Image (cartoon, rainbow, N blue to C red):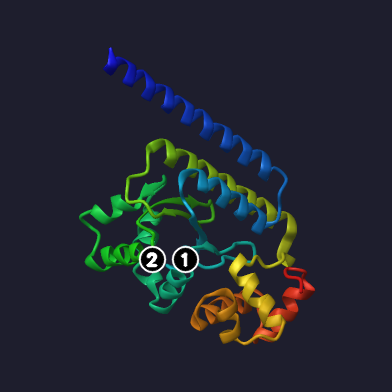
Amino acid sequence: MSDRFLSASRMHCHDAASEAFAVEFGRFLDQTDGVRNPDRLFCLLSTFALNFDCPWIAYGCLTPDKRALKPVRGDAKVMLQYPDEWQERYCKMSYETIDPIIRTSRTRACAFRWSEVYNDASTTDDERRFFDEAATFGMNSGVSVPLHDPDGSLAIMNFAQAGEGEFANRTINYLQLAALHFHLRLAKSANSSGSGETPALSPREKECIVWTAKGKSSWEIGMILGISTNTVNFHIKNVMRKTDTGSRTAAAIKALRARIIEL
């Protein structure tokens, strides 16, 4: 009797969780309906991912002849919500050249667990060390969603969490649907806004460029935000790239004029 009761309880909890996730996914679809701002779309996706204990997500595009995640044309985005130190490390070590997620995404049509790639016989020692190092920054497990476009370009959405357990199939299904919806909304937004679209900055990039506009040095910004000087410089360089400017001052001015930031 106790085993039967325990089994029924587990089934009830499973059904309740499924219903809760379905409700959250429906809410995500409703919240993104009509939204055109890329930052807002990314923020809503980030919030949805938290339902599955994924505090870190990243989205980027590749051209058919490039390996690195980078903007494609004028309408694509690179959006990162990863630990600052891992972003800095990834850039400094040019890890896009060995990133096994990029390699795998080129030949996959559906979402895949990072553990699948790690344990695959074709994965090299360098590629496994890439995952091992990511784990030292708290990203112990993840799921990647390849998003192939008809023109041959590829976007990748990554979801990462600190837990070492495997992602449930149901979780992967919801994350894949959310990633696809985000990708399509972003493409629709880009097509409707044209080449004059406002650059999308991450929350940390906005913080760094706001303090730059206030006349603070990288060291001072680092002290204010509790991050290293190198990390501050990393984010400011990203802002300069996204705003197509040659100096941090010019980037701050352009961000202010575009109302991306406010003082």
Horizontally, is 191 left or right of 117 in the view?
Answer: right
- Residue denoted by label 1: 83
Q: Secondary structure at mark 2?
A: loop
- Residue denoted by label 2: 137
Q: Toward the viewer: 262 or 26? A: 262
Q: Toward the viewer: 8 or 94? A: 8
Residue at image point 69% right, 54% down: 189
The quadrant holding residue 9 is top left
- Residue 261 appears at what percent x and percent y? 73, 70
Q: Amino acid at mark 1?
A: Pro
Q: Residues within 10 Å of mark 1 (few under 14, many from 20)?
A: some
- Residue 176 appears at what percent x and percent y? 48, 44
Mark 2 touches mark 1? (CB < 8 Å): yes
Whether residue 202 can be seen here: no
When the figure is inspected, residue 88 is found, relative to residue 112, above or below; the finding is below
Query: Which quadrant: the N terminus?
Result: top left
Q: Amino acid at mark 2?
A: Phe
Work out whether mark 2 precedes mark 1 in sequence or the reverse, and give the earlier one.
1
Q: Secondary structure at mark 1?
A: loop
Query: Which quadrant: the C terminus?
Result: bottom right
Q: Which mark is residue 239?
A: none
